[in-house]
Amino acid sequence: MKRARQKVVVENEAPQTSQKSKKQKTCLYDSVFGESDLHASMDWGSLPHHVILRIFQFLPLVDRARASSVCRRWNEVFHIPDLWRRFEFELSQPATSYLKSTHPDLIQQIIKRHADHLQYVSFKVDSSTESAEAACDILSQLVNCSIKTLGLISTAKPSFMNVSKAHFASALTVVFVNSKSLSSIKIDDTPLDDPSLKVLVANNSDTLKLLKMSSCPHVSPAGILCVADQCHGLKELALNYYILSDELLLALSSEKHVDLEHLRIDVVSENPGQVEFHTIKKQSWDALVKHSPKVNIVMYFFLYEEEFDAFFREETPVTHLYFGRAVSKAMLGRIGMNCPRLIELVVCANGLQPLDDELIRIAERCKNLTAMGLGECEVTCRGFIEFVKMCGGRLTQLSIMEEVLIPDNDYSLDRLHLEVSKHLGRMWFPDMMPTW
């Protein structure tokens, strides 16, 4: 009996030790994570609605739909209106695109149940006409909606440009007429036309603040004038240079309610030598700046060297300049002479002649310059240090490839970065890959 009693004691002690160990571990977890955190990590279905909503916002639509079947609580969150205010429809043809495509059944479900919740909508399509037409079909179904932001994004041309103008205009009209609260529209490379803009203005003139519509060949200067005259809250406008005119700048300057903050102009040439660019008068630029003193005028150039003749022969109040192709020394010299408001300059390429004099002139005349980027160009180390010395600490961004810098008798590359760092007031090195 004694041995049996001892055996019983031993058998009873083991579970007690195990329970004690578990309790110690539990106390340890509770002290580190908190008891409520431990229970929450063990039961995903008990997560608060706002936490599940945050998780869902990071998930692609297909994964979001799958997650909604985890439990009733997650399914409830799946249908909360806040989850459907921002949405991007991805449309592509599997045989020709690497993009993931939103499943048609899910699209129909979204339109049926959440069209009236959608506020920030974009369409990302590949280069196929079928994808662009599918986007137009979806737009045509957004009748019960109050969209505030609309974006049409083509990952490759031509896409929307291959859709018939009538089909595209009809689809946009549905959104323009039914939303009545559009504030931001980005529709590059599309067959948008003047009648569509008139519908937009007629229904959203009090709310429109941003209109970005570069490479829309069916839009005329008259169409933009209609927007400028009636959309008094317009803050940002992006368009192609061929639409820009003295008349448009004067219209933007004469309407007391319009106070532009950003004007972006794309200057693009697809066929070198076949496009003759017109000149904008200095008086028109001056009128715009007088009316909107803080306006940022951003110009993107994709021209060939022989096509720059019409630009910067007079003072131009541009603030941000980006040259995507080679630009000549003469052109950069004109910028130094005639762009006193310049804040940022990016030159992707130049010939094989050092740009010392041009950079020094820009440093002298452009007192607001805070950002500079140079790609396939040439500058002597001495000239570059002189440029940095003249600009000083106001250069908050300086992105230069090491291959741009030519060592001379005064400065080696090793010494250069120390001198530049001293004048900038911070550590600086040339970039292996520019960051602009």
Image: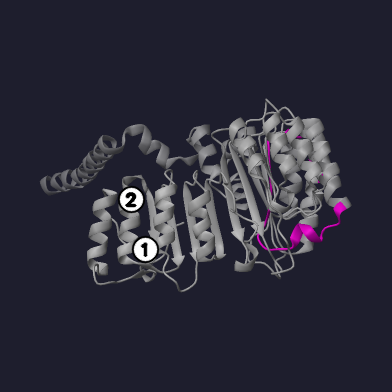
Outermost residue on the left side: it is: 2
Using the image, determine if residue 265 lies above or below residue 163.
above
Q: Is residue 383 left or right of residue 225?
A: left
Front residue of 160/430: it is 430
Secondary structure at numbered mark 1: loop
Front residue of 403/248: it is 248
Find residue 414 and report its image quarter.
bottom left
Residue named by callout 1: 431
Estimate how packed mark 2 is, as few (under 14), some (14 to 19) or many (20 or more) residues with alpha carbons within 10 Å. Answer: some
Q: Is residue 20 left or right of residue 295?
A: left
Outermost residue on the right side: it is: 166
Residue 127: x and y in percent read 72, 64
**Numbered label attached to residue 390:** 2
For the rendered model, the colour scheme is: one colour
Task: Give yes or no for residue 143 being in the magenta stretch.
Answer: yes
- Give how far apart the Cα atoms at labels 2 and 1 are: 21 Å
Q: Residue at x 67, y 67 (%)?
A: 97
Residue 98: x and y in percent read 63, 66
Please state the extent of the stretch shown in magenta in the rendering.
Answer: 140-165
Task: Give yes or no for residue 164 being in the magenta stretch.
Answer: yes
Residue 407: x and y in percent read 30, 71
Label whose residue precedes the other's in the sequence (2 or 1): 2
Which is in the foreground here, disc 2 or disc 1?
Answer: 2
Residue 70 visible in this rendered orientation of the protein: no
Residue type highlighted by circle 2: Met
Secondary structure at numbered mark 2: helix
Using the image, determine if residue 149 lies above or below residue 192.
above
Residue type highlighted by circle 1: Asp
Q: Residue at x 36, y 38 (%)?
A: 38
Outermost residue on the bottom side: it is: 352
Using the image, determine if residue 78 lies above or below residue 271.
above
